Image (tube, grey):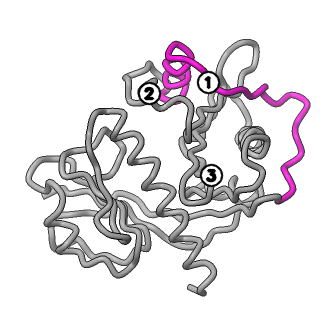
Amino acid sequence: MDGTKAALCRVAARNNAGWCDAVCRAHGLSPRYDGEDLWLSTVRTPPLYPDAVTLDPAVPAQRLLLSVDTGSPGCSVKDSFAALDLAGDGFEVLFEARWIHRPAGAPLPAPSPSAPRWSEVRDAAELAAWEAAWDGEESTGLFRPSLLGGDTVFLAGRAGGRIVAGAVAHTAAGAVGVSNLFTRDGADADAAWAGALTAIAARRPDLPVVGYEHGEDLDTALRNGFTAIGPLRVWLRTA
């Protein structure tokens, strides 16, 4: 990996750790940064969120594992540079993905006339509706109202009054991290990316956009102006 992409991966990893930190704190946890190269929570994090995020490829595995709870089910680690081998410690690779980056000021994708109308989620009731649309079932309270405002923006794409697309935009480490992008009820994925990116650019035109995706979602992000900058893995303790 060249130096520029390595630096961008560090920005993306730190941005993502900031989002994980915000979600954990909204649940009453007290995660911390262990130096400049590791973010972690010593107690189990909310569902879908890791117990640790590496911020540098040279983080020693044993130092990380001694800092998190590996004794109860569900411990997970976001290996931000695909640099760790935790297989011998009872972990399996849950999935692999690619960090993505879109520079500030990059041309926005052309909007579709039939695309959803995008707006910011403003209150707890809207957030519950957003989470239900994202989950496909109902709101479980994963995303707490205390996340609204400040560095975090929940974006909703609506058609006919229904939320048919959405995304989270979290500002940290000099970038906007886009995550949890979803579509439902037949909404077009490319239109959702275009709408989310347009909404983000309207709020923070001065910052690059980062995130991570894999599979078809990665292909869609690349079609909408992102570049894949480096690999990551998420490990789950199964032993």
Return the mark for residue 121.
1
Query: Circle 3: is it few (<14), some (14-19), or many (20+) Cα within 10 Å?
Result: many
Sequence-first disc among 1 and 2 = 1
Looking at the image, which residue is at 71% across and 61% down? 102
154 and 31: which one is in front?
Answer: 31
Q: Quadrant of the C terminus?
A: bottom left
Instruction: Name above or below for residue 84 compared with residue 74.
Output: below
Is 125 colored magenta in this rendering?
Answer: yes
- Inter-mark Cα distance, 3 to 1: 17 Å
Q: Indicate left or right for 91 with 14 as reference.
A: left
Sequence-first disc among 3 and 1 = 1
Q: Which residue is mark 2?
A: 146
Place residue 25 in its image quadrant.
top left
Where is residue 69 shown, x and y percent of the image? 14, 54
- Inter-mark Cα distance, 2 to 3: 19 Å
- Inter-mark Cα distance, 1 to 2: 12 Å
Magenta range is: 106-135
Callout 1 amino acid: Val
134 and 142: which one is in front?
Answer: 142
Looking at the image, which residue is at 74% across and 63% down? 103
Place residue 110 in its image quadrant.
top right
Q: Which residue is mark 3?
A: 176
Element class at badge 1: loop
Q: Indicate left or right for 193 with 98 as reference.
A: right
